[in-house]
Structures are given as C-alpha cells and as structure tokens.
Image (cartoon, rainbow, N blue to C red):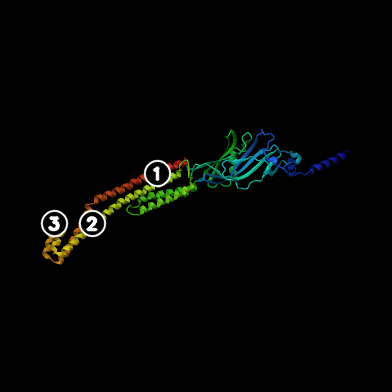
Amino acid sequence: MMHISFFLLVIITGEVSCKVCSYQDVLDYLNLTGDTSVFKLTRPVLDHTHTTVVKTDLILYAILSVVEKTQTFVPFVWVSVQWKDERISWDPAQFCGITEISVPKGILWKPDLFIYEMIEKDDSPQNPYVLVTHDGTVFYDEDMRVISTCKMDVHKFPFDTQECSLSIGSAIHCVKEIRIFPFSNSSRATQFSREVMKTQGEWEFLKMSVESSNISLYDRRWELLVYKVTIKRRHLLHVINFLLPVLFFLILDLASFFIADHRGEKLGFKVTVLLAISVLLLILNDILPSMSNKTPLIATYCIVIFALMLLSLLETILVTYLIDKDSEDELGLCDSGELKSKQIKTDCNTEIKKQNGCSCSYTVCESEKQHELLTVNDEVNYSGHSRDTNALQLIVDELKKLQNMMLQHFGPREERVKSVFWAKRINRLFFIFYVLTVSLFLSFIFMEWYS
C-alpha cells in the first residue's frame, strides 16, 4: 500500500513539473489576441465613477538647445507613465508564475497626456510596447525630444539663469476622471537627472522642481503636473568672444588721447575703433531676442560705450579744427605778405620802364618808413644806373621779410596762443570726464550682472 501511494505521488509531481506556460496563454486568457477594441476605446474602469490614477515621472536626459531669439527650449527627456486597467488581471500561480507581459501599445487604452508647451511634433523613435502586470498595472516608458516654448529673461545676458516649464496634463479628461501624481519629488527628480545627464552644451543644469496645478475652463477643471527646469548659462565663452573685445576697444580709445592732435592718425584711429564696435553690435543683434521685458545689460553696455566713443570722436574733430584753423591763419598771413611783395615788384618794374629810377623808388617808399625811403630816393637820383636799381630791389625784399616777421609775432600771435590753449584744455577736461564716466558705468554694469 505504501509503495502504491509513493508511485502515485511521483506521477502527480512529474505532471506538475512538466507543465509549460507561455505569454500566449496569458493573452488568450485575457482575450487580447482577438478583437481588442473593448480594451482601447474607453477609460479602463469597471465603474465610470472610479477615477483613473496616473503616475508619471520626467527625467531630463540632455539639453539639446536653448534659442533666445525664438524663445525655444529643446530638451531630451525620459517620460514614464503608470496607470491601472481594471479589466486586466490574472493569477500568476495558474501561469507558472508569470507576473508581467509586454504587449503592443496600440491594443490598450493610454491616457491622453501631452506637454502643453510643446510646439512641434516629436519625430524621435518611440517605444512600441507597454508592460502589463498581473494586477492590471500598465507601465509605459518613452524618450522624447521636446521642442517647447520658454519665456526667457535675457536682462543679465550672458550671466543669466532661465527657468523653463514642462506641463503634463490630459487633453479631455478632467479631474473627476483622471488624477495625475508624480513618481518622484523635486529632489529625487533632480538627482536622477544629474545621474543620467549626457550633454548640457552651453547651459548648466541646476535643479528640477515638481508641482501640481489646476486649470479651469467652461466649469471643468483639469489637473497638471508642472516640471520646472532651472538652467544657468556658461558665460565664459561670451565673455572671451564679446565682452572683453568691447572692453579692449574702449581701452584703445582711451589710449588714443595720447596721440598728437595736429596729425590725422588720431582721427582715423578713432573712426576704426568705432567701426569695430559697430560690427560687434551687429553680432549681438543676432543673439538677443527682438522683444524683451527689460533692456539687456549687455545692450546697454555696448550702446553706452559706443556713445562715449562717438563723443570722443566729436571732441577730436573739434580740437583738430581749432589747431587747423590757426595753421590756416598763419598760412594766410604769409600768402598776403607774398602778394604784397609781388605787387610792389610789379609796380616797380612798370615804373622803371616808363620813367627813371626815382619814380620807382618813390612808389616803394610810400608803403615803408619815410626816412628810410628818402635815403633810397637820394641814392637812386644820384646814381641813375642799373646796378643801384638791383641794390634797391634787394633792400625792398629785406623790408618785406621784416614786415612779415613783425606781423606774425605781434599780430595774430595772441589769438593763436589762445586757440591752442583752449584746444589743449578741452582735450584734458574731456579725458578726465571720459575716464570718470567709464569707471562709474563699468562699476554699475558689473554690479548689476552679479547681483
């Protein structure tokens, strides 16, 4: 009798151990191999008053692009969604301990979640399957390239910090039908994102916060899950490529005050520096957005420096004008002296041809001192020869030179000294004003940037 019982026990144990189970058995049991429209047409509840609880999680995988000009934030995120389908369940003991299966996502209902800030359709490869557990819990994971809008404040560019939101919510199901809760809190989401972060580019990821919010419309209320991503710009590249060159051009403009004013190199140098600043302003115009709530500090920085350089150029033009005016006055006096000399020579030659040497000497003497010309007249009357006429001409030339020297030294010299004095004084005062203005302005700008 004992042997028979043992034999029957061995047979039963062998049959149990040889039983083979497959995922297809589970699918057949759940009726997911035939017409599956009943599983995907309506919300997966047995009673319509039941609320479907959807748990979601968003992990930042990479920061692909941040475009200030179009106010666009492009991250690559990993979205995980979980909900329960009340129409699906099985006993794992009846199917060799199978607790979960993967099925195509097209045969089951999925919550109609979307990102409110998303402005373009995602074209990245999608996960074609969902994971279903024995108690009806459905897990769906998907990687997404999100092109979203983000209201950016570029007032402190390039030392700015931006906060972009990704709001996840249902399109048609209100709070009575779907409730959305996060898997992870803010600290865990930030930690997970830092661990899996692949690339950040120009930006540095700081933190991610998670909070719930509601929106109401037409007496209906929808629940949203808002993920706020805080990023900070890496400013070193902009400082090297933009801020420092502008500062160097400003230093060059300050150094140009030590160039001599009577030469044209100073004016040409300042114009060249001003054109270089104009090129940098064109580059800045391509970076910053067209509309902004506040004027960017970097734009103020460039415009004020441009204006100071423009004032410096105008001051250089004024000083150059004053110095050139004195030079023209001196040249005018010399030219007038030469014209008088030529006129005297012409009159003299004409009189010599018509009359004797006495008449010519008398004409010259009327423009010179009387006692000197009388002596010359006596000599001409006494000699009457051509040799004496040549000597008289030499004396007239010497008198002309003496007259020009006296006019230059005793005539316009006071005005010339006065003009040069004011030119140097204007240059010195403007240099002091320039240095003080630049120092105060740069101190204000840098305090604003780092505040």
Does 450 sit left or right of 422 as displayed?
Answer: right
Can you identify the residue that label 3 sits on? 370
| Residue 74 % position (x, y) | 56, 45
Q: Sequence order check: which comes first, mark 3 or mark 1?
A: 3
Relative to 43, is 409 on the left or the right?
left
Q: Nearer the viewer, mark 3 or mark 1?
A: 3
Mark 2 against mark 3, which lies toward the viewer? 2
- Which image quadrant for residue 339? bottom left
Question: Image height check: is 443 above or below 416?
Answer: above
Q: Is residue 223 above or below residue 387?
A: above
Judge left or right: residue 304 versus residue 139: left
Q: Which residue is farthest front?
A: 218
Q: Earlier in the sequence, mark 1 or mark 2?
A: 2
Q: Residue at x 41, y 46 (%)?
A: 305
Query: Which residue type carries mark 3?
Result: Gln
User: Residue 313: x and y, percent?
Assistant: 36, 49
Q: x and y percent of residue 382 in the render? A: 11, 64
Cβ–Cβ under 8 Å for marks 3 and 1: no
Which residue in the protein does label 2 denote?
336
Amino acid bearing label 1: Ser
| Residue nearest the viewer, comparing 10 with 211 | 211
Mark 1 or mark 2, whichever is nearer to me: 2
Q: Residues within 10 Å of mark 1 (few under 14, many from 20)?
A: few
At label 2, which amino acid type do we have?
Answer: Ser
Name the residue tied to disc 1. Answer: 439
- The residue depicted at 28 percent of the width and 52 percent of the height is 326
